[in-house]
Amino acid sequence: MNLLRKNLSGGVRGTLVGLFIVCLIFGLSVRVGTEQPLLQHCLAVISDHYYLLYFMLPMFLLLCFFVIEDDSEAVILRYKTYFRYFVHKWLSLVVISFIFMAVQLLAIVVSGIGLPTDGGWMIADGGAVQELLTVFSSFFASPALSFAAVTAYMFVGLCVTAMILMWIGHFLLRSSAIKIILFLYVLSTLSIKIGFLLELPITAFNHIVILHHNLTSPHRLMITAITGILLLCVILWTAKKYWHHQLTFSKRQWKGITPYYCKELINKKNVIILSAMVILMVVWKYLQGAGGISGEEWIIRLFAGHGTGSFHILSFMEMLLLNGAPIYLLAAFIEKATTGHSAFITVRLKKRRDILVGILTSALLFVLIYGIFLAAFPIIGLSVMGMTIDTGTLTLLGLSVGMRLLDIAAQALFIIGIYCLAGQITAGFIGLVIINLFCMAPIEYLPFGLSSLARIGLPQIGAEGITSPCAALILLVTNALFISWLFAAGYKRLPKN
């Protein structure tokens, strides 16, 4: 009882008030323009996965976040063993989950006051609600039975979710626990958008909480049940036997100048610039018109770049901005890193090759982070536009991002090479722009800009050009040649202080 009173204090009550208000507003919005019976209205609201995934589930995770951490040792000692404390705390979360469900159901019922109370199925034609109710009617004889099953399943799912969060909060540090919980939540939201995730035997929060997400495939409910039972067994066993352990992820301590360079290059400002560049490109392509196209066509639009044998100023600027954003930041970093060493940094350097290793390592991580943005934001765009994310779309996205990273890496190495030869980073950047202008000539095998899908023969658009394996090989060889020269001779021209 003491744990329950403690857990109900703080931000929990405010979360419940917010849940009631938003759920009531959502229920009223679902009711507008419809005259479906009360039970079907309640069923439609409580089963709407957009409401559940984008509001209800985050609210419950936030509610649990206030209480998942262990209490003080004095509180735990009252229960004699940690396992007893763990069980009692989970029982308090079960009560909170019940209150959470009761508040939600109260708001839904209030939103349906005045609707007819017919007991049978009355499914109107058209709309997502009709599809949802059709699924339920194939499994349950009446809306009342279906509503009872959905609410009972959700309550049990919330209780299981609460135990999972408690377990994560106990065995992981707070920062690591937040990252794991966010990953599981993102996995839950993506599972309804990305086609191949639906085919994998993965159990996320949405499967644990939302019943109809387990009714769309033959073995999905069995997979969720087996996974849930096994996970609960592991949680209870580890909480009883290994409660005194904690998982920690030690960071690898790099030696030399590399950590300093990584800190200088991969800072908050540069990461924001990279993400903003990709977001702007996605929004720009969306404003150009994205209606009625497939996911593959959307990816082709984003990564089309510029072809060869012609010149289109807008396409060239798009390619230059998307490729040039990380290269410009990298160029500014290189000039600062090689000319602005403090006395402390200079002492660490035994030879010029250390500078090159530090620059290349930090540049590689920087480009990989950019690659994550290039892959993530187009997927988010697809989800927002309601497009299907199938295996073909993801394959094309992987090809496009991989080619783009190889292209950017080659251009970055070119700038480093010019800097070694001329001692001017600006000269390297200007030279890079000039070489990219060679796209006006019909040179299909020019490495720089080769990641443009307009230069590759893709069956999706029926375009002629070199094959993607050939283009990837050219970029790999180009990168290998640049790196070989830098380690063989180029690094000797780098300033040491």
Image (cartoon, grey):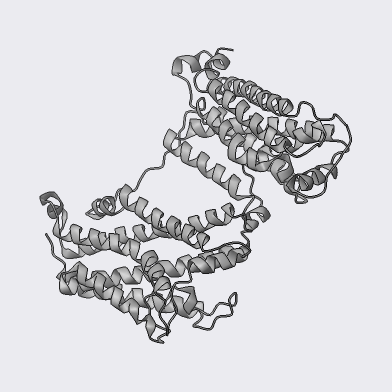
Q: Quadrant of residue 41?
A: top right
Image point (29%, 74%), residue name: 432
Q: Position of residue 75 (x, y in %)?
A: 49, 15
Q: Quadrant of residue 310?
A: bottom left
Residue 358 in view here? yes
Question: In the displayed structure, does residue 17 sit left or right of residue 420?
Answer: right
Image point (53%, 53%), residue name: 380
How many circles with numbers are drawn on the protein? 0
Question: In the displayed structure, does residue 16 sit left or right of residue 408?
Answer: right
| Between 442 and 64, the one nearer to me in the picture | 442
| Quarter of the figure with the C terminus | bottom left
| Quarter of the figure with the N terminus | top right
Q: Is residue 94 above or below residue 182?
A: above
Q: Position of residue 184 (x, y in %)?
A: 55, 43
| Between 288 and 84, the one nearer to me in the picture | 288
Q: Position of residue 71 (x, y in %)?
A: 47, 20
Q: Is residue 94 above or below residue 379?
A: above
Image point (52%, 68%), residue name: 301
Residue 238 in view here? no
Image point (22%, 73%), residue name: 418
| Between 135 and 250, the one nearer to me in the picture | 135
Q: Is residue 493 above or below residue 273?
A: below
Q: Is residue 492 above or below residue 141?
A: below
Q: Quadrant of residue 227?
A: top right
Q: Position of residue 215 (x, y in %)?
A: 76, 46
Question: In the displayed structure, does residue 132 sit left or right of residue 289?
Answer: right
Q: Residue furthest front?
A: 33
